[in-house]
């Protein structure tokens, strides 16, 4: 089943969720790793280009996921969820989208501060649309790093909540996002 139902997520939503999760966590780890590279390291110039391309891919998939989510019904929350859990889940998911978008946009502003375009795996380039802020690269860099760390904190909280639902509450929250069927 490709589309979501009232009971389960469809495969498109599941694949987009996990691919984005891997990209976001991988890009965060890559960002930390890149800061440790020395000037003469082979990856010193190559890693940022890969990081930018993966960031653009993340943006494209994030937009696709959002559009897919808007065009599909959402599975009903587990009957075991309390009202505060439902509310906090909606808030956390909204913030995950927003923080991801802020990290991507600030990365774009870092990369285009000198009016250079950003290459997408050498297939096409995204031109610099805005580079008028004084110290744009530094300001966007600070935002990029701080928001990335905040987002990773929220990703950790999201992960811990899903594990709590699975192992403590024994509900369908995690099982559904793994594509496994289980009734409430």
Image (cartoon, rainbow, N blue to C red):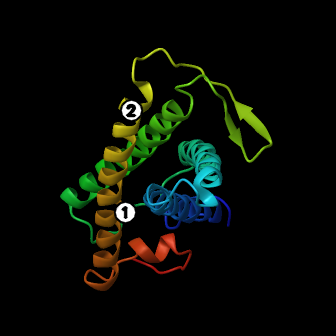
At 42% from the left edge and 74% from the top edge, which residue is drawn?
174
Mark linked to residue 138:
2
Residue at mark 1: 77
13 relative position to 36: left or right: right
The image quarter containing residue 144 is top left
Is residue 80 placed above or below 89 in the rendered structure? Answer: below
The image quarter containing residue 42 is bottom right
User: x, y (%) of residue 178?
Assistant: 52, 75
Q: How far apart, in angstroms, are the residues tagged by discs 1 and 2?
A: 42 Å
Is residue 42 placed above or below 121 in the rendered structure? Answer: below
Mark linked to residue 54:
none
Where's the N terminus, which quadrant?
bottom right
Where's the C terminus, which quadrant?
bottom left
Task: Tell me if mark 1 has few (under 14), some (14-19) or many (20+) residues whose alpha carbon lies within 10 angstroms of its own.
Answer: some
The image quarter containing residue 47 is bottom right
User: Of residues 28 and 1, which is closer to you in this image?
Assistant: 28
User: x, y (%) of residue 179?
Assistant: 56, 74
User: Of residues 18 and 4, which is closer to you in this image?
Assistant: 18
User: x, y (%) of residue 158?
Assistant: 33, 64
Is residue 159 placed above or below 66 in the rendered structure? Answer: below
User: x, y (%) of residue 73?
Assistant: 52, 51
Mark 1 element type? loop
């Amino acid at each position: 089943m490709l589309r979501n139902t009232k009971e389960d997520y469809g495969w498109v939503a599941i694949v987009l969720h996990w691919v984005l999760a891997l990209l976001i966590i991988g890009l965060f780890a890559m960002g930390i790793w890149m800061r440790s590279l020395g000037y003469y390291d082979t990856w010193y110039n190559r890693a940022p280009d890969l990081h930018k391309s993966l960031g653009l891919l993340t943006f494209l998939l994030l937009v696709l996921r959002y559009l897919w989510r808007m065009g599909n019904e959402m599975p009903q929350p587990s009957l075991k969820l309390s009202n505060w859990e439902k509310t906090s889940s909606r808030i956390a998911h909204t913030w995950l989208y927003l923080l991801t978008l802020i990290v991507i946009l600030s990365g774009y502003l870092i990369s285009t501060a000198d009016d250079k375009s950003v290459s997408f795996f050498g297939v096409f380039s995204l031109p610099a649309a805005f580079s008028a802020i004084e110290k744009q690269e530094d300001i966007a860099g600070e935002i990029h790093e701080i928001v990335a760390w905040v987002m990773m904190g929220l990703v950790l909280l999201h992960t811990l909540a899903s594990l709590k639902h699975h192992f403590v509450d024994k509900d369908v929250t995690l099982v559904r996002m793994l594509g496994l069927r289980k009734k409430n």
